Amino acid sequence: MPHAPSYYAATARPQPLRPALADRLDVDVCIVGAGYTGLSAGLHLAEAGFSVAIIEAERVGWGASGRNGGQIVNSYSRDIDVIEARYGTDTARALGDMAFEGARIIRERVASYAIDCDLKAGGVFAAITARQFGHLQRQKALWERHGYTRLQLLDRAETRGIVASDRYHGALLDLGGGHIHPLNLALGEAAAFESLGGRIFEASPAIRIERSFRPVVHTPGGAVTASFVIVAGNAYLGALVPELAARSMPCGSQIVATEPLGALADTLLPHDYCIEDCNYLLDYYRLSADKRLLFGGGVVYGARDPARVEAIIVPRLLKTFPQLANVRIDYAWTGNFLLTLSRMPQMGRLDHNIYYSQGCSGHGITFTHLAGRLLAEVLQGQAERFDAFARLPHLPFPGGRLLRVPFTALGGWYYDLRDRLGI
């Protein structure tokens, strides 16, 4: 199946058409899913000398890894203070020590393998209300207590110099954040993995995992026997592993790309930083390399494709940038991310030799790259950092698969109302 009709697919670097698995293969590690989690784990393992095969139902980066907003955002969907309140000081310290590692891994990969993905530095959290700005002040102090010092608070006037919108009370600039062309990052990581002897099979969905001393992953055309299996399908895993599906819910997010804006783009975002606001159902946006505005937001619980993405996103875009009222929309697309009840990522073991990572809950670009490193570590006998996440409770959604969508949508409506009322 071709990639989604996105700006990223239209501007992606050339990629080979990789074969489907058509025979039986024996490797050290079989990875299910050629998105960021699978590619990151595969690259770390190939660098360590493992023989690795990745099987992908569609194409490299076909899911969230090739469709997302392209923003490098540090920490997790629930920040370190929430982690400490829920799970204790030791867990908060362990996860806090890793909260900024994913962004560093991305930059290391781009530099080491010369990946051309339009990497830019700088990300901004924009506060719409004074209450949100107070949260950003506390976030800065929190991150600095964990050793992260690349943050600057911006008042209303300084924020207006960063983004040409009158919506914001203030902002927090993270110089360690940034943005990328996400599909080109995935394609570059796939090429790096293959340069080390790794093998990727496209159009090869996993249809069954045979759990045994050496597990076997079956596809329609073949099978992979391995010492270890990593399940990295995230929001596109389907029903392959029912116990994982019960603990998570795919959700849709939508993005539009304008026509190239030329000099107007430099007036909107003169420093070329990416922006996300502080609402519960947040908006996020940035410029592309060819000066389009990429603007995303909204959540469709249960991952139904909306009839018209523009109808959801363009009103939000114009609320931020009314000066773009007459600008043409060239691309509009949707993609799924995987939500957990706790909003924390889930990592763990399905068996002593089958591992998984899923449910980044909107912070996938950085966490997936960290997850790949942790999965590689645990397969090499270093389990401490992996287990810091694996020990977190992985809660099922109340009401099961039938009621998880309406219950979560009701919660989303409540928090959206709070955002609208500024409380």
Image (tube, rainbow, N blue to C red):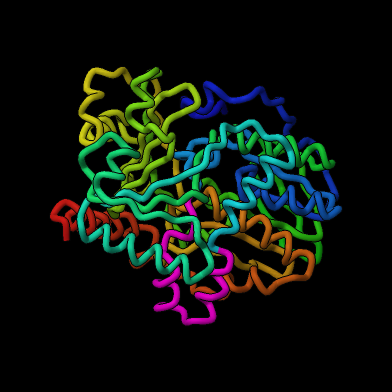
Residue at screen point 13% across, 55% down: 421
42 shown above or below 70: below
Is residue 136 left or right of 175 when viewed as pictured?
left
Where's residue 112, x and y in %?
A: 74, 42
The quadrant the N terminus occupies is: top right
Q: Toward the viewer: 359 or 152?
A: 152
The range drawn in magenta is: 73-98
Q: Does the stretch in magenta take in 89?
A: yes
* Picture residue at 76% right of the left edge, 64% below the top: 379
The quarter in which the C terminus is drawn is bottom left
Residue 103 at x, y percent in the picture: 57, 51
Residue 309 horizontal/vertical position (percent): 32, 31
Residue 330 visible (yes or no): yes
Viewer-closest of 16 and 364: 364
Q: Is residue 76 left or right of residue 35?
A: left
Identify the residue at image location x=30%, y=45%: 158
Q: What kind of secondary structure does the magenta stretch mostly adopt?
A: helix
Question: Is 143 colored magenta in this rendering?
Answer: no
* Vertical order, 187 against 263 (above or below): below
- Observer-nearest of 261 and 303: 261
Residue 207 seen in render: no
Residue beneath the point at 72% across and 33% down: 20
Question: Is 404 placed left or right of 12 in the picture?
Answer: left
In depth, the one of 171 and 5 nearer the eye is: 171
| Image quarter of residue 116 | top right
Compared across the picture, whether 242 is left or right of 141 comes to right
x and y percent of residue 248 in the render? Answer: 45, 59
